[in-house]
Amino acid sequence: MKGTLIYTDPEHLQQTEEVFSSPNMPGAEHLQVSETYHSGFMGFGVAITPSSCYELSLMYPTERKKLLTHLYSKEGLGLSVARLCIGSSDYSPEIYSYDDVAGDLLLEHFSVERDRRYVIPIIREILQIKPELFLFASPWSPPFWMKTGGSMCGGYMRTEFLEVYGDYFVKYIRAYEKEGIRISAVTPQNEPNNHQKGKMPACVWHPEAEAAFIQILRRKFSENGLNVQIWMHDHNFQDALSRVKWSLDNCEGLSEACDGIAFHYYLGTIEQTKELMAEFKHLDFHFTEGGPRLSDHYETDWCKWCLMGVKALKAGYRSFTGWNLMLNETGGPNVGPFLGICGGFVTHDHRTHQLRYSGQYRAYSHLVPYITPKSKIRSVSVSEAFQPEMGAFPKYRIPVEGVVIEGGDGKDVAVLVNPNETRLQAQIKLGGSLWYLEMPADSVCTLIVEP
């Protein structure tokens, strides 16, 4: 068996070296691989927001194609999932819906014309590279006239417009179909608990209104022959029990009408969703938003994002999608309050005309190329004999997190995260042999064992 270690740490990006099988080393941190496994993971991706499309449209066509080929092709990173915005979000250069004519109950003025300038062309260019890309779409706000307050920014959804809003979704999916873009899933509302103080496209939904709308969508999709999944919630982990479980327990027909539940990472933890997963086994779970911060370790937070990805894989999530594919050096364009805060998966720097890659991109590079829906994903945990030492209290060492990915070709891939400030010696059993590796401080390590 041959062992190869690829690691990223503050001194190295994707450093490769050979590692060897080893006899037992009692003082090393022994990593246990679970006997049970998950499979059917759809893939990793990022949101192709209007801001991302705008920034990509400013690049030279040859440079843009080179970048997109690297990100989406099998020969490159191989992203396989993407999120689209139904109308504008805060990460858009402009604010609009697809029908801005008040009271247009027949949606006679519905049009995706504004997306044809830079959104649709970029999505189609990506699909030329990755035709099988799984696309799901989310609205940040219904048209202003369907809400309280009379604005796309803030307000509450008015239940008398649920039926026409269902027709609005159908028209969007059909319009994009005509452009050669297939939408495979939708979420009814991005962050339904959040009005964002009226500073960006947003809309609050009562849980019962969301449940009623999901059932309307299911009926309208069926009537129109649309095979489109519906993922409820699309908001924080923290609301898993207080909102999501309450809705599923109390809103008749909701559990049967939706296909999955979508979560963001801004409040709470993935662990808070495990009770839901155990109770509602027929629903798929998806991580649908979270991205790097421009001024907070933008290029070096690989441990954070690999930990998030690994935790989602260990929990049995079906997909993992980050936030903006590309933004500029100021974190824009942006029509909300977060300019200068969120960074893109890739940054297009207008000052230097160079591309900068985020720590999230670095983390994906250790995970994405090795996972397919057929892969068996096993959890890695620290042996009970190697728990944090009480003598180190309160500066506990954070346990190593990881997964093992079995591709069915005899190759085993362990992706391991050491978020500590010190180097760790570790051993893990793969392919019938015990392997020794040294994990640098603040590192993500990919161990590949093959015949």
Image (cartoon, rainbow, N blue to C red):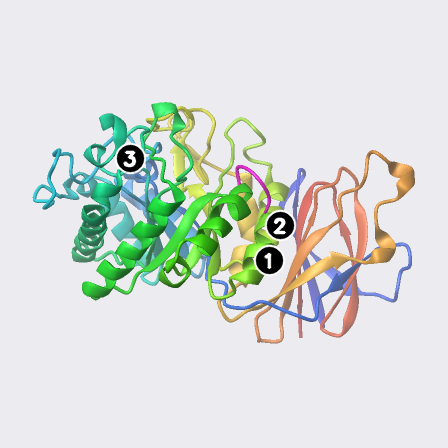
Query: How many C-alpha atoms fall within 10 Å of the one at disc 3: few (<14), some, or many (≥20)?
Result: few
Quarter the N terminus occupies: bottom right
Q: Residues within 10 Å of mark 1 (few under 14, many from 20)?
A: some
Q: What x and y, as percent, mark residue 397?
A: 80, 41
Comparing labels 1 and 3, the label whose residue is closer to the camera: 1
> Of callouts 1 and 3, which one flags the residue occurring earlier in the amino acid sequence?
3
Q: Which mark, residue 58? A: 3
Mark on residue 40? none
State left or right for residue 366 relative to residue 217: right
Location of mark 1 (residue):
315
Q: Find out whether residue 232 is within the magenta segment.
A: no
Magenta span: 264-269
Q: Quadrant of residue 238?
A: top right
- Label 3 to label 2, Cα distance in Å? 41 Å
Q: Are marks 2 and 1 in contact (CB under 8 Å)?
A: yes
Front residue of 219/80: it is 219
**Residue 257 appears anywhere in the view:** yes
Give the class, few, some or many, for how many residues have Cα within 10 Å of label 2's Cα (few <14, many ≥20): some
Image position, residue 407 (x, y; %): 57, 71
Q: Nearer the viewer, mark 3 or mark 2?
A: 2
- Name the element at disc 2: helix
Q: Is residue 24 above or below residue 362?
A: below
Could you tell me how far apart the alpha carbons at marks 2 and 1 are, in whole angstroms?
8 Å
**Sequence-earlier tag: 2 or 1:** 2
In the displayed structure, 263 sits above or below 152; it is below
